[in-house]
Image (spheres, rainbow, N blue to C red):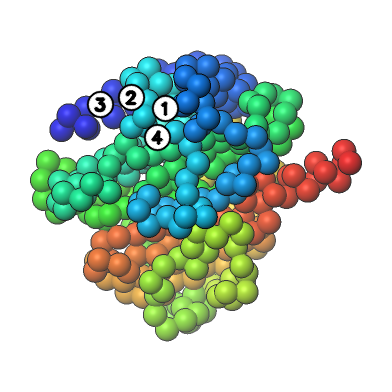
Amino acid sequence: MKGKNILSALIATAMIFLVSCKSTSPAKSMKAAANEFLNALDANQLKKAHADFSHKNRNDWDFFPDKFVKPEKKRFGLTLKEMNAKQKTLAMNLLKTALSEKGLLTTEKVIMLEQVLFDLTKDPIRDKELYYVSIFGKPDVNKTWAWTFEGHHLSINITLVDGHHFSVTPQFYGSNPGVVQKGPHKGLHALADEENVARAIAKSLTPAQMKKANIFKKPPEEIFSFNHTKVDQSLSEFRKGLKYSEMTPAQQNELKKLINIYIEKFRPELLKSLDNSPMTEINSLVFVWVGSLKPMEGHYYRLVTTNHMIEYDNVRNKAYHPHMAWREFDGDFGEDLLKKHHHEHH
């Protein structure tokens, strides 16, 4: 419970910081929070937390515990474990410049589950403070830079091109256990909305609609996009599925609700700054559902638009271990924005 109280205190402090964020643009808030965090670090911490924008690991990301991250993709950054109380607060303040209240609370739940796993297994790789903060480039409203917050079952990646063009993908959330079965957090379902709303959509489909949505025989063991830097669109026929135009108005509204569960983890001011999102491309959307319609039985779904993919898989641990990601086919880590910048300025 002590760990929960410490994390809750950090979240509460960050919530106060949210009030000040609302009065400034996301870019200015991020610049201020990032520089305040960096200025609070000593020389050794700074080497771990800060690197050039061209650093080889900037586009690496992962959702496994540290023990299972491949050596060539070893996480760059400074862990919460290596920070003092003030530095942890400043790290959470940076996270708050990107995430909405809903996103921050979901993040808190995912991190809390590391303590739940430790209590169940006593395995030292389960550590609620093994989450990394990294900053690439010089935080400035006129420069190109990036930052990440990442650890087991969590990866938040923000890229700013020319200081104000945003990329917020890849985004990843996972949960193990999917629903806590015992202990002080019994009943905690960290990613309930992502599962329940999608299942309700699938259950509303007619047999003819389900035939189009059910494009392969069984749910995969893992999301197809995995932890790759760039999504390989040839892997699983990403453009196939039930078309948005083939759904009823009620079903379409539920799809919009599902999309918002993912994208509204970010601040509304930040979402308004995006060039496009799954919501702006809604008419190109296809919906896929594979697997059981019953809770605690394996299932998979995804939403694909012209440039975006939301992917969810829950098969492992008897369907008590969901993984989900929001990816862009050509825009993860600001790739499309960087190409546009290069074309216009060079």
Q: CA distance from mark 1 to mark 4?
A: 12 Å
Mark 4 nearby-residue class (10 Å; few <14, some 14–19, many ≥20): many
Mark 3 nearby-residue class (10 Å; few <14, some 14–19, many ≥20): few
Q: CA distance from mark 4 to mark 2?
A: 15 Å
Q: CA distance from mark 2 to mark 3?
A: 6 Å
The three-letter code of the residue at mark 1 reads: Met
* Element assignment for label 3: helix
Q: Is residue 332 above or below residue 38?
A: below
Residue ID for mark 1: 92
| Disc number for residue 10 | 2
Residue ID for mark 3: 6
The quarter in which the N terminus is drawn is top left
Q: Is residue 319 above or below residue 11?
A: below
- On screen, residue 110 versus residue 276, left or right, reads left
- Whichever of callouts 4 and 3 sits on the residue coming sooner in the sequence is 3
- Whichever of callouts 1 and 3 sits on the residue coming sooner in the sequence is 3
| Disc number for residue 227 | none
The three-letter code of the residue at mark 4 reads: Thr
Q: Position of residue 315 (x, y in %)?
A: 32, 69
Question: Are the two marked residues, 2 and 3, in contact with CB atoms closer than 8 angstroms?
Answer: yes
The answer, for residue 278, to whether it is visible in the render is yes
The three-letter code of the residue at mark 2 reads: Leu
- On screen, residue 80 versus residue 248, left or right, reads left
